[in-house]
Every structure is written in C-alpha cells, then in structure tokens.
Amino acid sequence: MSDVEQEIWDFLHRHLRSVFTQDVETYRATTSEDLSLYEWFITPHRQDGLDFHFFMIENSWAGSGNDFRYDLLEPRLQLYGNTAVVSYTFMLSMATEAGITHRSHNESRVLIKGEDGWKVVHVHKSPAGE
C-alpha cells in the first residue's frame, strides 16, 4: 500500500469513528459543507449539507452509547489525483443489554483533497442484501 493510500484509509477511519463517538468537531473537519448523500434507510431522496447529520450525531443515532465496532468488508480505493472513491460493505456490530447485533450496508464515499486535506463530499449507501 502506498503512503497516499494509507493516508486515505487512515482519514476514512477517523471520519467514520467521529460519527459513532459523537465527535462533531472531527466530523465537521472531515466533511465538506456541501456534502451530498443517499441513505436508503432514512429517505429515498438525496440529502444535502451537514445540519441533518449534526442532529443525528448529537442525538446518538448510531447507538454510540453502546460498545461497538465496525468492519469494512471488501474495501476498494480508486484514486484519481486529488479525488478518491472508496467503496466497501460496512458492517456495524454493537453490544447492547439484549446481546450483540449486526447490521450492514454497501457504501461508497467520494473524497477530495484540498488545502485543508481530505474531505468527504459525497456518500451513497445501499442495502447489502439478506
């Protein structure tokens, strides 16, 4: 793995962890203000901007009060200059009072490198199947 590829994966993990640890400051630093995304499990329409996600993060939507881990299955990185496309199946495992639960979905994220480093500019999530 090249240094740039490692940098991108490290960035992505920092970004993803910010969602589950309610780290709004890191989420803001790693996400473009003009973010666009599709999250099939929330709405079938595109969402734009950060306000919705700030609300979700601040209100523990991801179960961040629980012990959790995530895995990126079949990760792929496509790098085109200062643009990167990462895709994978995202599997979230959470330990709750009722036991361990798992959920997964397919995910693609587009990252752009600017003066402030890498930022997520687009996310697309789709069902991973049964």
Image (cartoon, helix red, strand yellow):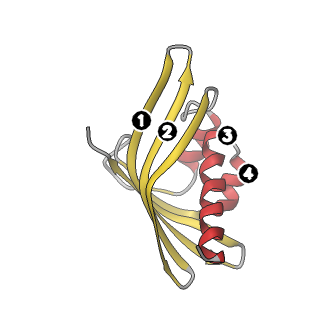
Q: Do the residues labelled 1 and 2 touch (CB within 8 Å)?
A: yes
Q: Which amino acid does label 3 sit on?
A: Gln
Q: What residue type is labelled 2?
A: Leu
Look at mark 4 in the image and give the residue it sits on.
25
Closer to us: 129 or 29: 129
Instruction: Give the spatial CA distance, label 4 vs label 1.
Output: 26 Å
Closer to us: 81 or 57: 81
- Percent x, y of residue 53: 56, 46
Q: How many labels does the image show?
A: 4
Dot 2 or dot 3, earlier in sequence: 3
Nearer mark to the viewer, of 2 and 3: 2
Residue drawn at point x = 54 percent, y = 42 percent: 70
Residue drawn at point x = 60 percent, y = 59 percent: 12
Dot 2 or dot 4, earlier in sequence: 4
Would you call the spot at circle 1 few (<14 residues within 10 Å), some (14-19), or many (20 or more)? few
Residue 65 left/right relative to 46: right
Residue drawn at point x = 65 percent, y = 61 percent: 10
Residue 92 — which label?
2
Instruction: Give the spatial CA distance, label 3 vs label 4.
Output: 9 Å
